[in-house]
Image (spheres, helix red, strand yellow):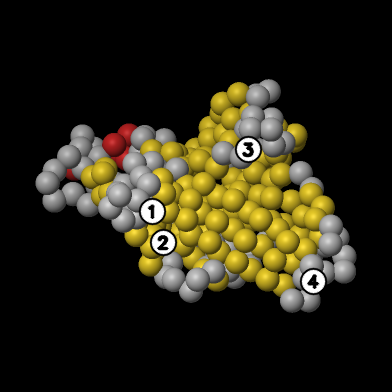
Amino acid sequence: ISIRTDVLKLKIDPRGAMLVSSELLKYPLEKKADSPNVVLQDTKEEDYFVAQSGLTDLTTDKQEVTFRVENGQTDFVLKDGQRTLEIPFVWENAATGLKVRKTLELTRGSYAVKVKHQLINTGAKTWQGKPYEQFTRAQPPAPPKHSMFTNPESFSLTGAAWYNEEDKFDKKSFADFDDEKLALKNSKQSWISMLQHHFVSAWIPGKNEIRDITTSTVNGGVRPHYVITSLGQAAAIPT
């Protein structure tokens, strides 16, 4: 699914309706005329970086489901004079009666993507689960030596960063990811992020939400993938 605004060009994978590509249309990678734009999320193995969000079913521990766009559209463009753009994804489980509507909202001039989940339970049992947000990425290759003065990626930290009310801001490079696993319980006023050459991708939950923040390393095939997750409190959706 392709999305374009005046400042962003995005691609969404229906599996989990996750963000798999984001190009910053106003930011060239280097200060020269023919420079490509900065790309954050990407699925190429050497630059793998995706942003995921959804719901964890407490009975099955299943997270990823395949959504469909509600109206079947595959390309979305913010038109001239249009202030906001909404992309509605839906997923239904006929066996349990659970329906999830996940809406992405983008606004002209803004790099923020608002994510809203609406759950409808028409089944015979109460559904229980937890919301989560997550970044998964590989260590990107080092930039060419000749670009160290024109490409900020060559001298910036690439890794994870997070914040909560009690412990405040902290960060961890990928080289230090396995030294000590992060496990912050009941975090208030929190957010998680991945840092990349003077840019940051962040998941920011609602103001009053309480979250558990963790880091992990998983097998990504050719190279390891580094993961930072924000997991919300359990919620029950009655019939």
Residue on which disc 1 sits: 22
Q: Pointer 3: what residue?
A: 206
Task: Please name the residue shown 76% across and 60% down the image.
Answer: 57
Q: In terms of sequence position, does the residue under pointer 4 or pointer 1 come before the other?
A: 1
Question: Of all residues shown, which one is farthest toward the bottom?
Answer: 94
Identify the secondary structure beneath mark 2. Answer: strand
Crowdedness near tag 4: few (<14), some (14–19) or many (≥20) residues, C-alpha within 10 Å: some
Upstream in sequence: badge 3 or badge 2: 2
> Residue 10's image quarter?
bottom left
Left or right: residue 160 compared with residue 25 = right
> Which residue is rendered at x = 69% and y = 50% of the image?
131
Residue 215 spot, x, y in % from top left: 63, 44
The image's mark for residue 11 is 2
Residue 67 percent location from the top left of the image: 58, 69
The crowding category of the residue bearing disc 3, from other C-alpha atoms within 10 Å (few below 14, some 14 to 19, many at least 20), is few
Of label 1 and label 3, which has the lower sequence position?
A: 1
Q: Amino acid at mark 2?
A: Lys
Residue type, numbered disc 3: Gly
In the image as oriented, which residue stretches furthest toward the right? 125
Across and down, in percent, residue 58 comes to: 80, 58
Task: Give the mark toward the camera: 1 or 3.
Answer: 3
Please name the amino acid that badge 1 sits on. Answer: Ser
- Label 4 and label 2: CA atoms lie apart by 30 Å
Q: What whole-number distance in Å separates the C-alpha atoms at marks 3 and 2?
A: 24 Å
Q: On residue 198, which mark appears?
A: none
User: How far apart are the two marked residues, 2 and 1, measured between alpha carbons?
Assistant: 7 Å
Element under label 1? Answer: strand
